[in-house]
Image (cartoon, rainbow, N blue to C red):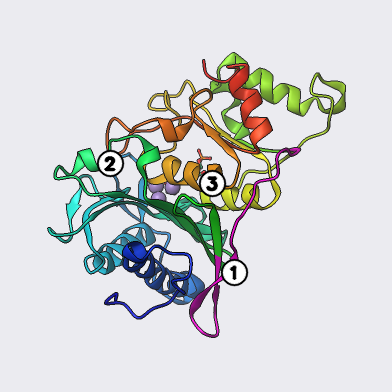
Amino acid sequence: MPSQPSVISPDLIPAELYPVINALCAVSIDVAAVIAKGPLGQSLGSQVGENTDGDAQKALDVLADEMFEGALREANVRWYASEEQETVLTLDPAGKYALAIDPLDGSSNIDVNVSIGTIFSVFDAKDEAEASFLRPAREQLTGGYILYGPSCCLVVTFGSGTQQYVLDPDTKQFVLVEKAMSVPATSKEFAINASNYRHWSKPVRTYIDECLAGKEGPRGKDFNMRWVGSLVAETHRILTRGGIFLYPRDGRPGYENGRLRMIYECAPIAFVIEQAQGGATDGETPILDLAADTLHGRTPLIFGSAEKVAAVAAHHELSE
Ligand code: AHG
Ligand code: MN
Ligand code: MN
Ligand code: MN
């Protein structure tokens, strides 16, 4: 049994992965407590550095990374790849698993009290560190996220549907609330950072123009738009009420493959979405059929209601 006290019921969690999931959940309870203190505690949103991918590193990015890394040393994890680490760390040389993590997703929202999260993905550990992560995303053993929102929840898949657990603040236990989440097949809601309009390719602009044209346009309906700036919050909304999320490639230097990183953002999000009957592609190809070429490699990401994502892929309208 795990070295950590149990904070989640083992019911739907494969026994050999339970120590990893339990460690992630145990740390997330501590991260949630740090976040809940806000300015009453240490300064969480101050910039303390820059990571390999060029992101400003906030204090909470680094603190969360240290907290997860420490706990995962006792959870049968050999290789640890993090947004906040340049290279793969060795945790337990005899460990069975390779874990990729975005310790704190949505860092720009730390200071403004908007939902943020942690995203994780687990493969079986190969003998070579990077090779354990640079492989088809469909080989993931588990993937998911913790959302530090008005309520704290875990959404996870082991390849047999997508489950949701909610942290009970009274008992400090994650309780199963949904055995099989399902993305509504269609929706009128799209999520994109519209301030990048001038950088998009023509097909992306056309697609969004048509959404903005409402009933007068070729798509014939009025759409609603959301953009939170936290991938975990967008994912949870779409898993709950449908929608389509787009972070396409754009013309800015460094954004030729968009902004989101494959192994610790796109692959685990695609896994939970596909397991909930949604779609997730790079505009054409299912994300789960792709492999990252470098640890912090990026990919365009379009995911959400299956009909919406398929329509985009069918017309190859966003893939240029
Ligand atoms: P992170 O904070 O882990 O670096 O991730 C931020 C990501 C993702 O959460 C969000 O969807 C996206 O960045 C927002 O990008 P823009 O700031 O370009 O809108
Ligand atoms: Mn970042
Ligand atoms: Mn992120
Ligand atoms: Mn992050």
Mark 2 vs mark 1: in front: 2
Q: Is residue 121 magenta?
A: no
Q: Amino acid at mark 1?
A: Ser
In the rendered image, residue 208, in percent from the top left (x then y), is placed at 68, 25
> To which quarter of the image does residue 210 belong?
top right
Classify residue 41 as left or right of residue 217. left
Which contiguous range is marked in magenta?
165-188
C-alpha distance separating marks 3 and 1:
23 Å
> Which residue is under mark 2?
133
**Tag 2 near tag 1, CB within 8 Å:** no
**For the view shown, which residue lies furthest in the right direction?**
216
Residue at 38% x, 27% y: name it: 254
For residue 71, above or below residue 162: below
- How crowded pointer 3 is (Cα within 10 Å; few <14, some 14-19, many 20+) is rated as many
Classify residue 211 as left or right of residue 53. right
In the rendered image, residue 51, in percent from the top left (x then y), is placed at 29, 45
> Which residue is under mark 1?
151
Mark 3 vs mark 1: in front: 3
- How crowded pointer 2 is (Cα within 10 Å; few <14, some 14-19, many 20+) is rated as many
Q: Amino acid at mark 2?
A: Phe
Q: Amino acid at mark 3?
A: Gln
**Tag 3 near tag 1, CB within 8 Å:** no
Mark 3 vs mark 2: in front: 3
**Which label's residue is closer to the chain start, 3 or 1?**
1
The quadrant of the image that shows the N terminus is bottom left
**Which label's residue is closer to the chain start, 2 or 1?**
2
